[in-house]
Image (cartoon, helix red, strand yellow):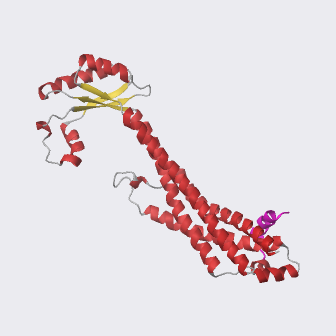
Amino acid sequence: MNMFQFAIAALWTGDRQADRVVPPSGFTAQLTLFAAGTMAFLAVFALAFSLASGRLATIWGQELARTATIRVVAPIDQRAAQTEAALRILETTKGVASARALTDAEQQALLTPWFGAELAIDALPVPRLIEIVEDNEGLDPEGLRLRLAAEVPGAVLDNHSRWRAPLVQAASRLKLLGWISTILITATLAAMVTLAANAALSANAQVIAVLRLVGATDSYIAQAFIRRFTFRALSGAATGTVLGVLAMLLLPSSDDVGGFLTGLGFEGRDWLAPVLIPFLAGAVAFAATGAAAKRTLKELA
């Protein structure tokens, strides 16, 4: 049985005599608890950010792929006639599930954030917008453009392909950024635990020398440090995770205010992700402390 196998077996059983080798409090204990708690807190937000970005990419990809818009750019006295002509074409176009012209009130609501509520839309040459919802088969944009050009010269089809792909790509990159942040957080925790374990091992060099004189093996000594630091990281990460989840619950819901940040959170099975954070922190601490103990004990030999 090597050092790591021995440490795994002793992790749950424990050994009070071996645990006395590691000081229960002090700088290394505080550093481990603080690092694990802080990294877990940040990991909650990194995971939420990554998962929310993934949902956003899926939503944008699905919804925008099934919608299109026609702008009827024509003089005011011809706009209604050309709008009706475009709607008649859409009624016989394959792939169109539904189509409707937006009302003046709806178009004014779209322009209000930029021009204010006092905008007189009837006095401006604002094109009439037609909203198209595609069916599962989808429409042929090039064929529809040719029909519109022949029968409704003032109609311009926009199937959102120009800006749909960049939006989905941006959301996918945000998701990747979230996972990279999680990996960096894990690496930082491993580095902090390694520093704390090295400090504790060096501070107890004389105690370790005495234990060796009385017959203690390096595996016996290492498992004491591994057990202590693993449970410190586990408890610190559990506290940080709980605080992170509570902070997430304080964010406004997407039903209250629109926007991407209000959808930042966990949904459905995503709630399993923060539950795994303390166990991941414990595993990282276990591996980091074991490697540090093996290296430092070899140097102290």
- Residue drawn where x is 15% and y is 34% of the image: 125
Q: Does 184 sit above or below residue 208?
A: above
| The quadrant where residue 136 appears | top left
Assess whether residue 285 is covered by the magenta stretch.
Answer: no
Q: Position of residue 75 (x, y in %)?
A: 14, 27
Please say if 176 is above or below 280. above
* Residue 5 is one of the magenta-drawn residues: yes
Q: Residue at x 57, y 61 (%)?
A: 185
The range drawn in magenta is 1-15
Q: Is residue 108 rendered to the left or right of residue 23?
A: left
Q: Residue at x 11, y 26 (%)?
A: 77
Task: Say which of 52 and 162 sits in front.
Answer: 162
The image quarter containing residue 98 is: top left
Q: Is residue 14 above or below residue 268?
A: below
Is residue 237 in view?
yes
| Image quadrant where residue 274 sits | bottom right
Across and down, in percent, residue 269 comes to 55, 51
Instruction: Answer with left or right where residue 10 lies relative to residue 146.
Output: right
Residue 301 percent across, percent down from the top left: 83, 74
